[in-house]
Structures are given as structure tokens and as C-alpha cells.
Amino acid sequence: LQDQSGNTSAAISDYDRAIEINPKDGDAYFNRGSIKLESGDNAEAIFDFHKTIEINPRHENAYYNRGVIRVRSGDHAEAIIDFTKAIQIDPKFINAYWGRALSKERLENYLEAISDYTKVIEINPQYVDAYFNRAIANMKSGDLKSSCKDWIKAEDLGNKNAAKLLKEYCE
């Protein structure tokens, strides 16, 4: 397809044609929406993800991408709903846990964010940013001891900012 060669307008035209031929082709909507998401056309992309979900309510990536758009627009509460739906469909969807954790943190739901960062770490123990962000959420919730443990782990995994915060808060 055209989108693999970088010709996004031709790829969108290809997907437009595929949708004309088969308006129930959820993957065509999803792929077209993904191209629009990458190009920053959030309004058009969210329409395509809505259509994908309408056709296939178990399309976890459509929920995830719609959540990403909602984060971009600052609608973290709705993003959490979409990320949660993606997780319900695929309980190991690490990016959905990550997105949901970030949104929960933005809404100052630190304990819930910590839970999601912990799940990211359970799925991938090498996810350095999850340790770093969980440390920040722990600090904001008043648990400096846990923050220090996570910054140590983040530093061990190569995060230079963790070393700075360790010196500032934990020594």
C-alpha cells in the first residue's frame, strides 16, 4: 500500500476507495485513521476510529488511538475510558496502561497512576520510564521512600534524570 512508501495522500485515497467498495471494512477505517493521526488530523482520525469501533467493538488499537487523540486534546477523563477499554480487550496492552497512567497522573489520581505504572513494570521490567514516572507519582502522593527505590532502579536502567532526583531527595 501507499502508506508504506510514505505517500500518505495516495494511501488515504486508497483507503477512501476501499471504504467506498466495502463500508463495513473496519481495518480500512482504522488504517486511514492511523495515517490521519500521524499527520495530526485529529478530528478526521477520531471519526475513523469511531467507525472502526462501531464495526468492530473489540478493536483494541482503535480505542488506544482514540485515547491518544483525547490526551492530545487534554480530555484525560475520556482518554482513560478508551485506554481502559483497550486493556479490557487485551490485558497485556502495555501502551494502554502507559497512556492511562499518564492521564491519571495529569488528573492528580496518583495512586491509580502508580497502579498502572506498576502494571507496565510487571509486563516489561526494563521499562525505565515507568520506574521514573512511578517515582514522581509516589513523591506527589507523599511516599518518598518508594520514590527513592524507583529512582535507584531507573538510574540502574540508565535514566540520568533519576540520578539527579536521587541526590536531591534521597541523600
Image (cartoon, grey):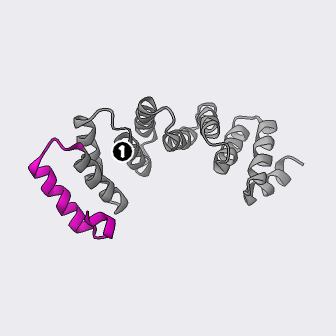
Of the residues shown, which amino acid type is indicated by label 1? Arg
Circle 1 crowding by C-alpha within 10 Å: few under 14, some 14–19, many from 20: many
Frontmost residue, 95 versus 113:
95
Residue extending farthest to the top is 88
Q: Is residue 22 magenta?
A: yes
Q: Relative to 157, is 36 on the left or the right?
A: left
Task: Reply above or below: 84 against 49.
Answer: above
Magenta residues (range): 1-26
Task: Reply above or below: 119 against 167.
Answer: above
Majority secondary structure of magenta residues: helix
Q: Position of residue 90 (x, y in %)?
A: 45, 33
Quadrant hosting residue 137: top right
Q: Position of residue 36 (x, y in %)?
A: 30, 58
Q: Is residue 107 magenta?
A: no
The residue that label 1 is drawn on is 66
Frontmost residue, 64 versus 111:
64
Q: Position of residue 7 (x, y in %)?
A: 28, 70
Quadrant hosting residue 105: top right
- Please give the name of the residue rendered at 82% of the width and 51% of the height, measured from the top-left corner: 166
Q: Position of residue 16 (x, y in %)?
A: 16, 56
Q: Relative to 1, is 136 on the left or the right?
A: right
- Please give the name of the residue rendered at 60% of the width and 38% of the height, measured from the top-left corner: 123
Frontmost residue, 13 versus 104:
13
Task: Reply above or below: 118 against 166.
Answer: above
- Quarter of the picture containing the N terminus is bottom left
